[in-house]
């Protein structure tokens, strides 16, 4: 097939051509050729050979120029070489051969996937998977030729160059073929291993499955279902059905990630019969090659297709690490407040920086050997037993109980916080010196806080730019040691100062108002924080509306809010500003809103004014003093949120440091599975910490596959055992007693008002973007990344939260009824059900079925 070059070697071959070998079509192409010749179901297509790559490079005069670029240093070579490829056209004969093969697929209009296939790829002792590029949903001759050229250019990415250097492979010894196949419009896809790559029980085959195209699974965007099939009996031995939040779908110009519809998110992708059918194909492939295989598959119109089959190159990993600070204690843990800020299972890098942050802002980080905060199954929890013991020792038990309810929510009836067996004297001895030092630091930092907040955005931007320009590992390490670490600590200390400023005011003000005027008017009289964009939680929404009106430009909006998002403390995940389509999606959604934030704020202003008038009529002599106290608290709240936004910004800086460290060391995103000290060690040339990555990655994948744990946990808690219990409670776990789940949904009354409407249960802010105007949002927890959604909804119900949680504050500012901290709302309510939300009483009633 195709026009040959002078020595008779073709530039294009069919998939099942016996001459399709590693040397002629690369590792991926050779594997597909064997599958096709073995009668396995593979999508039809053809292969652009390594000789075609050589012809292109030679005809464009690139051979010497590639060598010159590499000789000048690998750090900059990749971008220069790729630019050379992008500026060169395929020679006529080669172009005609490729287009003739394409026309044979479907009159030159077939939609295809174009995949790179390197000659140093998919080898038994090396895995180059992911080093070169793949292009999906390619249609038309021009797009095809461009994708083929881009695949060739991807042989020269910085990552691929660094990988070959570490593996000792000479760059001149590697060429690239391209596999072109008809695109599988899969409704489900995944990966299958004919042996357990994590060293599980022998005799089991492992199938991972998710909705949509397989890219979401391969790239790690989604936690897939896992089905274990007994190889001998060909029966399903075990299955773990994950919450699959996103899926990859084809679009007119490529692919994109979309939220999985709520009714399929926790539904199994494969039936037992389908899993067994896949297993049979897997065993046929293993027999064909004679060794275990890592197989990519897809399902289209009920039929399975094999997309790729590689050797299982991953060495058997050790058992997943155990991340569980609840072991060995009888403490009461809560994820409220903390779970709002950090709602994800944390990577080890994130957890190490969160620990550093907490160590800088908390007094008495450990007491009696028990941490004040910890990781339970990778999720962030506060140990209330430590904080309650500290409060009791200093005579603050009553004040702690009041503040605890506002910050962490009400404890269930009959549940108490177990105190640590520590005498008051011992607590004083362990903490009083630290407390005095912290008080002195807070006082000094409080005076500098306004100036710090004014300079912080520009200072962080300067440091981010210098991190991006760091030329080598030594320069990056010096920048961390000399400036970045100190600035990180400075941001933490400033938030500490802002948090402690007038810290008792809210407890006093709300308690007094509640006693004088009741809960509803107390809520109204303490709103107004978000007017004029002064409250950071409201900023992304009010700023978006200003952008839509033309009051600010896109650059200003991105600079101001681009670091604030639903995952702003998980440093392995991108910030909103890293997504080029982020602003456009928000603006498009804003156009569906019937009533914008300004209208709601005006209505709340009128309601707040009326509440103050009622207060003045009943307590005329107290109005002036109470206004002073409320304004004092409001100023303190705005200051805290402003400091918190700079901490979120500095976590973006930390993300940049880790990403740059991955680029400069050639270890990429593996560094997210190391802690801060280990990352610095790798920057210094010590690669021993990397040995821990497989076990940590396995732990991360395991914990992410489980449902979100209960908000309250008492005693030792095993996430896997809890997840396997069909009668588990989603709101609390008590190792001392079995508490059956409740069928009723109730929580903290966070924002008054009664609304009836259609519920929409969503798991992520990305899924929440599909909310219809007027629906009632039911979710686990919200944070600032959810704020732009609030003008679409008529009420909100959350599993996690308290009176000072994000959902509560923003709902009160906008006059939206809210019930938070229900624990079981997302498991007891289904999308489409009509429900009644009473934000004043803290109740949720299901009125009819979906």
Image: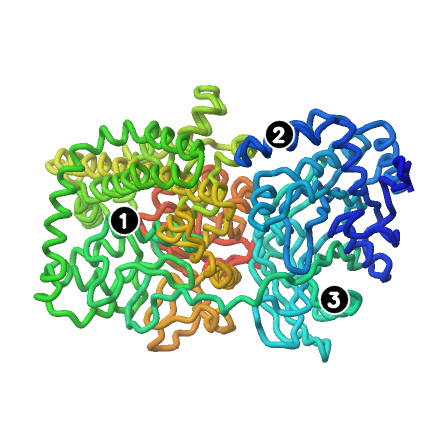
Nearest to N terminus: mark 2 or mark 1 = 2
Question: Residue 519 shows which numbered tag?
Answer: 1
Q: Residue furthest bottom?
A: 233
Earlier-in-chain disc, 1 versus 3 = 3
Residue 477: image x %, image y %?
36, 41
Quarter of the figure that contains the C terminus: bottom right
627 sits to left or right of 736: left
x and y, in percent, of residue 124 in the image: 68, 60
Work out whether mark 3 precedes mark 2 in sequence or the reverse, and give the earlier one.
2
Give the quarter of the image for residue 610.
Answer: top left
Does residue 625 lie above or below 348 as drawn? above
* CA separation in Å, label 1 and label 3: 62 Å
Which residue appears at 25% of the width and 67% of the height?
A: 417
Query: Is residue 525 at least partly visible in the picture?
Result: no
**Is disc 3 surrounded by few (<14), some (14 to 19) or many (20+) residues within 10 Å?**
many
Q: Which label sits on residue 68?
A: 2
Residue at x 39% of width, y 40% of height: 474
């Amino acid at each position: 097939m195709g026009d040959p070059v002078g020595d008779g070697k073709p530039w294009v071959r069919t998939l099942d051509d016996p001459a399709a070998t590693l040397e002629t079509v690369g590792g991926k192409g050779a594997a597909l050729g064997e599958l096709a010749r073995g009668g396995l179901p593979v999508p039809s297509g053809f292969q652009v050979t390594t000789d075609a790559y050589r012809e292109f490079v030679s005809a464009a005069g690139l051979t010497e120029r590639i060598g010159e670029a590499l000789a000048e240093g690998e750090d900059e070579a990749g971008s220069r070489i790729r630019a050379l490829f992008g500026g060169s056209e395929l020679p006529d004969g080669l172009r005609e051969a490729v287009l003739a093969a394409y026309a044979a697929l479907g009159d030159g209009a077939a939609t295809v996937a174009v995949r790179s296939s390197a000659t140093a790829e998919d080898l038994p002792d090396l895995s180059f998977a992911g080093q070169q590029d793949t292009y999906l949903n390619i249609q038309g001759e021009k797009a095809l030729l461009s994708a083929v050229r881009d695949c060739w250019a991807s042989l020269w990415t910085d990552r691929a160059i660094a990988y070959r250097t570490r593996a000792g492979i000479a760059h001149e010894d590697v060429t690239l073929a391209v596999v072109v196949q008809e695109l599988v419009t899969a409704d489900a896809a995944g990966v299958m291993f004919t042996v357990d790559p994590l060293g599980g029980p022998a005799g089991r085959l492992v199938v991972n499955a998710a909705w949509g195209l397989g890219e979401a699974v391969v790239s790690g965007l989604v936690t897939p279902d896992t089905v274990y099939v007994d190889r001998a009996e060909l029966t399903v031995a075990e299955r773990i059905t994950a919450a699959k939040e996103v899926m990859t779908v084809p679009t007119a110009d490529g692919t994109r990630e979309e939220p999985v519809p709520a009714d399929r998110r926790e539904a199994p992708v494969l039936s037992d019969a389908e899993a067994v059918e896949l297993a049979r194909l897997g065993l046929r492939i293993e027999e064909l090659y004679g060794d275990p295989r890592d197989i990519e598959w897809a399902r289209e119109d009920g039929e399975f297709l094999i997309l790729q089959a590689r050797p299982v190159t991953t060495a058997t990993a050790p058992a997943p690490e155990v991340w569980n600070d609840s072991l060995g204690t009888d403490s009461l843990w809560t994820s409220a407040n903390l779970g709002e800020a950090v709602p994800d299972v944390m990577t080890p890098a994130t957890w190490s920086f969160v620990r550093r942050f907490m160590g800088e802002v908390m007094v008495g980080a450990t007491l009696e050997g028990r941490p004040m905060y910890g990781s339970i199954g990778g999720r962030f929890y506060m140990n209330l037993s430590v904080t309650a013991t500290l409060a009791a020792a200093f005579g603050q038990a009553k004040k702690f109980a009041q503040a605890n309810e506002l910050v962490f929510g009400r404890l269930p009836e009959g549940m108490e916080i177990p105190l640590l067996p520590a005498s008051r004297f011992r607590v004083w001895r362990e903490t009083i010196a630290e407390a005095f030092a912290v008080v002195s630091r807070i006082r000094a930092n409080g005076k500098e806080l306004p100036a710090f907040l004014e300079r912080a955005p520009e200072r962080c931007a300067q440091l981010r730019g210098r991190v991006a320009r760091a030329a080598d590992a030594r320069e990056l390490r010096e920048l961390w040691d000399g400036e970045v670490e100190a600035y990180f600590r400075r941001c933490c200390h400033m938030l500490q100062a802002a948090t402690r400023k007038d810290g008792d005011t809210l407890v006093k003000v709300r308690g007094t108002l509640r006693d004088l005027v009741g809960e509803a008017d107390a809520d109204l009289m303490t709103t107004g924080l978000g007017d004029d964009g002064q409250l950071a939680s409201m900023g992304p929404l009010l700023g978006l509306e200003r952008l839509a009106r033309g009051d600010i430009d896109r650059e200003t909006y991105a600079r101001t809010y681009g670091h604030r998002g639903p995952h702003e403390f998980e440093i392995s995940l991108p910030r909103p500003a890293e997504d080029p389509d982020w602003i456009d999606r928000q603006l498009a959604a804003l156009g569906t809103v019937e009533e914008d934030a300004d209208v709601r704020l005006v209505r709340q202003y009128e309601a707040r004014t009326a509440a103050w008038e009622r207060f003045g009529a009943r307590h005329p002599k107290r109005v002036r003093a109470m206004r002073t106290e409320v304004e004092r608290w409001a100023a303190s709240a705005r200051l805290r949120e402003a400091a918190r936004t700079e901490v979120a910004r500095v976590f973006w800086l930390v993300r940049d440091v880790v990403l740059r460290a991955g680029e400069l060391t050639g270890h990429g995103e593996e560094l997210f599975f190391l802690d801060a000290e280990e990352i610095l060690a790798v920057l210094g040339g010590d690669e021993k910490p990397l040995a821990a990555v497989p076990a940590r990655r396995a732990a991360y994948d395991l914990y992410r596959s489980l449902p979100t744990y209960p908000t309250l946990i008492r005693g030792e808690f095993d996430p896997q055992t809890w997840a396997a219990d069909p009668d588990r409670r989603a709101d609390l776990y008590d190792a001392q007693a079995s508490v059956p789940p409740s069928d009723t949904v109730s929580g903290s009354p966070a924002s008054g008002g009664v609304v009836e409407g259609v519920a929409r249960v969503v798991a992520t802010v990305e899924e929440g973007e599909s909310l219809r105007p007027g629906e009632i949002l039911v979710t686990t927890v919200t944070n600032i990344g959810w704020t732009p959604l609030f003008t679409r909804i008529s009420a909100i119900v959350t599993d996690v939260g308290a009176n000072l949680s994000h959902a509560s504050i923003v709902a009160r500012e906008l006059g939206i009824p809210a019930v938070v901290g229900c624990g079981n709302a997302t498991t007891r309510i289904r999308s489409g059900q009509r429900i009644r939300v009473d934000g004043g009483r803290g109740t949720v009633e299901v009125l009819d079925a979906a």
